[in-house]
Amino acid sequence: MTTTFPQLLLQHAAQRPDAPALREKEYGIWQTWSWKAAAAEVRLMACGLLSLGFAKGQNLALISDNRPHVYMGFIAVQSIGGVPIPLYQDAVANEMRFVMEDAEIHFAFAENQEQVDKLLEVRESVPGIAHIIYDDPRGLRNYDQPGLISTAELVARGRQWDQAHPGVWESMLGQVSPQDVSVILYTSGTTGKPKGVCQTHASFIGAASGAAEVDKLGPQDSIISYLPPAWVGDHLFSLAQWLVAGYTINCPESASTVSIDMREIGPTYYFAPPRVFEGMLTSISIRMEDAAPFKRRMYEKAMELARRVGSDILDGKPVGALDRLKYRLADFAVYGPLRNVMGLSRIRVAYTAGAAIGPELFKFFRSIGINLKQFYGQTETCAYVCLQRDGQVDLNSVGQAAPGIELKLADNGEVLVKGVAVLKEYYKRPDATAEVIDASGYFHTGDAGVIDANGQLRIIDRAKDVGKLRSGAMFAPNYIENKLKFFSHIKEAVCFGHDRDQVCAFINIDFEAVGNWAERQNLPYAGYVDLASKAKVLELVADCVAQVNADLARESGMADTQVARFLVLHKELDPDDDELTRTRKVRRNFIAEKYGVLIDALYAGKGEQFIETQVKFEDGRTGTVSATLKIIDAKTYPASAAA
């Protein structure tokens, strides 16, 4: 499909002008933009930018939660030959500064006062930011800094400019080519400074078209847009597929109301990284622990049945008549209400991507009737390399090559990708581009994988993270970490073991889930540090680790990678402390360096270790948190003889 995003918007506006394109919940009421209204708003926003001096080829930064004007802003910038660059809305000013300088930003779109304040702070050291357009005027009435303008003022200026310059916008729109860069998405920077990934209209439209074809997406579908607009996954699902398939996107009132808004909207198509599904399961587990004994027993029995036959029923495989009847009754009494609580009652297709998902977590959702599938890709491939087709879902793989994608493995097992979705280049980094795209045009993903006889790709881990124990056993830390995070009481885990005799782990407890458990145990605690150090909490975590070790002992070649020793960290790993990326991926090397004293203690056989750590607070201040951490010897099992 050789077209551009603005052209797709105009096609929908012409073919189905009154159909809903976007919805936003504001003050408790859903506001709707039709395709015709969205196209008109985009035109006026684009003309407003031209009136301010925005020129073809310039970049514009967007920092906002999921708002209609953000998605319309993307298309407005593209329609006049500009390039939108979304930034993570929870990034601090210092993180934004690098992108603002690297991308030479003169124009920025900010959602509200919080983001305007950050941009004004950045402007003190990056004076080139001339114009800041804000969407929500609350708190900004008395701001008189130069270059500030509201979205409403921008649209009003655009209307006047359009009338004074007839035909100019259409002319500029006609000059936009499918091979032009449509967006620059900055990588999360797990190993260094972020790089700007330049993707074209053709690459994202190619990715969106392939996925829409596989899952038969169309105007009848609707999604909820709640993930960071700076993340490639949201750009694919909330912008590219929205414009290709023509479904409705719904923007929640706030991050805290997403679950309520989901129940109201009842999306048919849903996308979330594993951490969101982990959070849903944790919430269910907490509810069931607080339920009456009869309800708990009913839930346990229903889940036992679901684990046995739920996935087979979903995949249309043969299941006995009695089990089908039991499942139908359990669906009425348990699974249906569960789906409703999560806002997933109308889901036709759900995807997870962004990180590996534990097989147990994956199976849980499929077993209760949610058609959850895996999607695999990177920012450099529009998040589009592999996807799972209906009826071919394998818990341990990420599916087959997506339409328009060629897939192969390098001699060292690294996954190589060629096709419609591969990046054009890294922004101003020809050296980095040459490192990842070889002479044959294959993009080197950095992931280690295996392709089975059915063409299904199984990702083992990041190639740079896969190592070996001294025994020679393969060590894939992410695989073990995902098994640990399946337990509702464990929020994050980081495993170490390369070139060592055994595997050791850092654990973060889930404060809400463990706090709820502690209250039922009549276990008082003063906060996260206190709760994480309680002897009963350490026993609870030790039991989870033992169950993971039992699983690993049963798996071929994995018995040597059982967790031998672990400790529960005194603080949550946090993007603000640089321990996680903004997409909540572990910065493994940084953590190993920052907490080197704890790793040394784990491998030295110590029983405890004191540590003091600097932390950043939300208001920008810094402080310290200290504790003496207990180090626990985990229960391990002989290979293939787990209890």
Image (cartoon, rainbow, N blue to C red):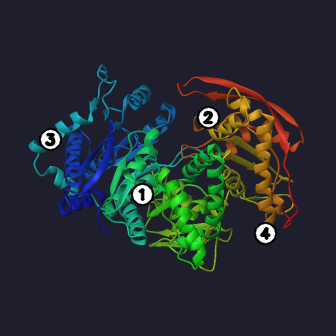
Residue at image position (69%, 37%) is: 520
In the image, farthest residue toward the right: 605
What secondary structure is marked by label 1? helix
Q: CA distance from mark 3 to mark 4?
A: 67 Å
> x and y percent of residue 206 in the render?
39, 66
Mark 1 or mark 4: which comes first in sequence?
1
Residue at image position (69%, 68%) is: 412
Nearer to the camera, 489 or 112: 489
Q: Amino acid at mark 2?
A: Asp
Q: Which mark is residue 159?
A: 3
**Nearest to viewer (mark 3 / mark 4):** 4
The residue that label 1 is drawn on is 236
Pointer 3 with pointer 2, Cβ within 8 A: no
Q: CA distance from mark 3 to mark 2?
A: 45 Å
Nearer to the camera, 632 or 64: 632
Nearer to the camera, 82 or 257: 257
